[in-house]
Amino acid sequence: MGRKVNPYGFRLGIIKDWRSRWFADKAHYAELLDEDRKIRLMIRKDLDKASISAIEIERQRNYVHVWIHTAKPGIIIGRKGANVNQLRTKMQDLTNKRVKVDVTEIARPETDAYLVAESIAEQIERRVSHKRAMKQAVTRAMRQGAQGIMITVSGRLSGSEMARRETQREGQVPRHTLRADIDYATAEALTTFGRIGVKVWVYKGEVLPERPAVVAS
């Protein structure tokens, strides 16, 4: 089960929240879903150097609220907010609705699974040894407070004739425990030998339910 189900989807509604939060009837559901996809693609395409980890979208009637989680908020905001205003205008033209954009800084990008996977994929594309890239990512994540990390790369590693898979792991990564906060992401490196897939699991500790307050009698 832990190897077959996306760790994020596995924990939805338990310790994880949906990244798109809105309700629509059958007539408009597909249209709004496609609109969400276009918003995410546009942000990632226009701000591909901004180290964006996640994009959350919340909708109300004729209003869209977008949160962008990034390690480099300065690139998105721009000088005196010029870049973020331009981005907001493009999204309003795309959706024909009022749009609010909030930029959230990721304090420790070394423990963000998406940014780690993208970093390893970029290094592999620059012909850095995959073993070295994986080892450095594992070391940095553990140094920044991750309780466990596992990285898997698969494909024609180092230009080998046959595709293979290699994994590096440190600490604990409990993939079946629903209260375990597992950050998971995938990325692809486009090399002259073909695509190399990168998967990253980062364990950040347990999320325990809050105890009900005891009222003194």
Image (tube, grey):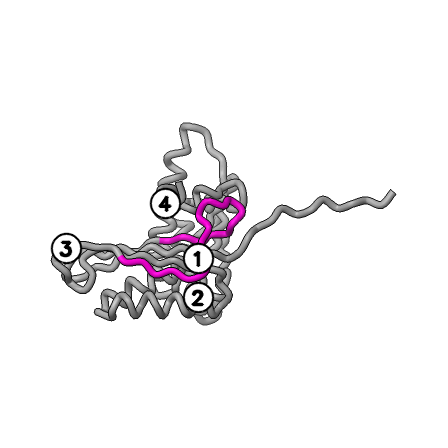
The amino acid on which the numbered mark 1 sits, given as a three-letter code, is: Val
Q: Is residue 45 left or right of residue 52?
A: left
Q: Which mark is residue 141?
A: 2
Q: Residue at x 34, y 51 (%)?
A: 41
Asked if the residues shown at circle 1 and circle 2 are in contact, with their CB atoms under 8 angstroms apart, the answer is: yes
Q: Is residue 184 left or right of residue 13?
A: left
Label 4 neighbourhood size at 10 Å, few (<14), some (14-19), many (20+)?
Answer: few
The amino acid on which the numbered mark 2 sits, given as a three-letter code, is: Ala
Q: Nearer the viewer, mark 3 or mark 1?
A: 3
Asked if the residues shown at circle 1 and circle 4 are in contact, with their CB atoms under 8 angstroms apart, the answer is: no
Q: Earlier in the sequence, mark 2 or mark 4?
A: 4
Identify residue for label 1: 202
Q: Residue at x 31, y 68 (%)?
A: 133
Asked if the residues shown at circle 4 and circle 3 are in contact, with their CB atoms under 8 angstroms apart, the answer is: no
Query: Dividing the image into 4 quarters, which one contains the N terminus?
Result: top left
Q: Nearer the viewer, mark 1 or mark 4?
A: 4
